[in-house]
Every structure is written in C-alpha cells, then in structure tokens.
Amino acid sequence: MSLRNLSPPLVTLAGVATMAGLPAVDAILSTTSLAALKFINTAAFALNVGAVSVPGRLDGQQDDEMRKGEINPSKPNANETASGVYGRNRCRTLVDPSGWAFAIWGPIYLGETAFIATQLLSSHADAVIPGMTAPFVAANLMQSLWCASFRPSYLGGGMKKYISAGMLAGTAYSLSLVLEAGNAAAAANPAFHAWMLTPFVIHFGWVSAATLVNLNGSLASDSTSSPLALTALGHSSALAATALGVGVTVAMSAPVYGMTLAWALAACADGMKKRKAAHSEHDEKILGAAANVQRKLCLAGSFACLSTALYTALL
C-alpha cells in the first residue's frame, strides 16, 4: 500500500501504537547488540528519508504552485485552486513562517546522515546508541506518518485534519527522549560528546514549532472556523512556542533548542509582515489586526528564546 493511500484511521492507529509501544520497544532493545541497534537506526532513518520523498504532501504542492505562479502574494487574483483548501485558506492562519525558515531542513538531514554514518563506521557514538535507538525509531516512524497525513485528503471538516499535527507532536516528544538519552550518556561517559546530537536537537526544536504551525493551518483549512478562533489559537501558539523555547532550553540545558525556536518565531513574525489579506472582508478586519499583534508576540518570543539560549550556553 502506498504512503499516499493510507487512511486516516490507519495512520492514527499506527501513531498511537508507536507512542504507546515506545516503553516496551525500549525495554526490548536494551538487550540488543550494538551492531543490531546501529542497523535499526539506519533502517529507521532510511524509512523517514523515503517517506519524505513521496510526492503529494501539502508543502510540496505549495512549492510547486509558487513555482508556477499559482500562489503569488504579489498577485492577489492569482489562481489558487491546485491545492484547493490549503491554498485558499492559508491567509487565514496567524502561524505561517516565511519560506526561508524551511532551509533548516538541510542542516537537519545532513547532520543526521553524518551521525548515521558515524555510528556505523566508528565507536564514537556507542555510549548513546542503547538509550537513543527506541525513541529515534519512534521519531522516524511518526514523521513518516506525518508525511502520510499532511495531504489534501485530510483537510477540511472533521477531526482528520488534526492528525498530521498529532504525528508531528509525537515526533517532537520522541526526539526529546533522544536528547535526554544524549544528556545521560554525556553525564555517564565523559568520552561521549553531546554535540554529536546537535542535528537531533535542531530537529526537535523545529518539529516542536512545526506542530503549532500545522495545528493552526489545520484549523484554517476549515472554512467554518471563525476568525476569533484562529486568533485565539494563533496567539496562544506564539506564547506556547516561547514557553517551550525558554523552558526546554533551561530544563534540558539545550541552547540549540532555544536558538531553533528563536529562528522559527522570527520566521513567523516575518510571515505576518508578508501575509495576504483574507478573502472575506469581515475576516480580514479581525485577522489583519490580530496579525499585527501576532508579529509582536513572535518577535518578543524569538528574543526571549535567543536570550535564554545564549545565557544557557555561557553558563
């Protein structure tokens, strides 16, 4: 069965099973050889890369449409029918980062590829492999399920539009456990360098923010969602991202996480400066004013996250 054809109930069931089974899988893998764990890590990462490459996701369609001129902020009357609901309602969300923010995927995947190669070819990462494998596998599975659910068929009315956000939340939680395993390994084994997990920390930070982006986009995809509901979710998401950036950075001594949230919030602030007006005059009266507030919230949040990250790094 193709990734593109997985039904919402099946994707949901797979995601819940992955998260619920994580402790049991961790217990099983704790008795597995290092060689086997390294192979499992490699296979899980390969699955993720393969899932990301399957066409048809909403972000891929958006990119294609922008290249064709079908989504063009400088042309208000441009045709936006290719991705239907997503294109038409994107202007209603208050959490919409500028395109430059997504360049962060390059360092994430390059860094994780380097780690996979390092753990196969040397013993430098051996100290962290037993503790990180189960959550790393879960993170790759959850992101693969996100790839299956972040598609036009999941948008619109009903709860299925929130499945993709749930898959990203599971990805973020799993990556937090990878960071936790890295901190434990560094404390127990001075020879292990925690900086080796930097790509995973960036990934953790980015999908934390992406979960909120996805959640807001899902609500906006439903044309019956009121501008007040979109405003409330948008503002609370900016505050939640700031709280995560500051709280996780301090609690897990992870300045890179705070810097990543600062990057995401700065991109969201920039996105509000460039946003298109909502098609409904009534909606735009509310969302236009809310966007100005949102930009300030995101800028303040970005500054708070960056300041916390720098302070933590210098301690």
Image: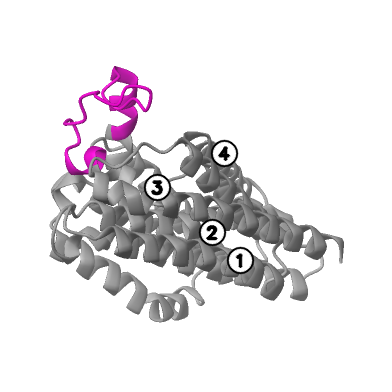
As drawn, 273 above or below 130: above
Dot 1, crowdedness within 10 Å: few (<14), some or many (≥20)? many
For label 1, the residue is 179
Q: What number is the disc on residue 288? A: 3
Is 64 included in the stretch rendered in magenta? Answer: yes
Left or right of residue 112, residue 291 in this image: left
- Count neighbours of disc 4 (C-alpha within 10 A) and say few if under 14, some if 14 to 19, many if 20 or more: few
Q: Which mark is residue 277?
A: none
What residue type is disc 3 on? Gly
Judged from this view, the residue extending furthest toward the right is 315
Q: What whole-number distance in Å separates the C-alpha atoms at marks 4 and 3?
A: 38 Å
- Residue 19 in picture, x, y percent from top left: 36, 73
**Residue 15 point in image, percent of width and height:** 29, 67
- What residue is disc 4 on? 110
Marks 4 and 3, the one that precedes in the sequence = 4
Q: Secondary structure at mark 3?
A: helix
Magenta residues, start to end: 62-88
Look at label 4 and name its amino acid: Leu
Depth check, front residue: 118 or 174: 174
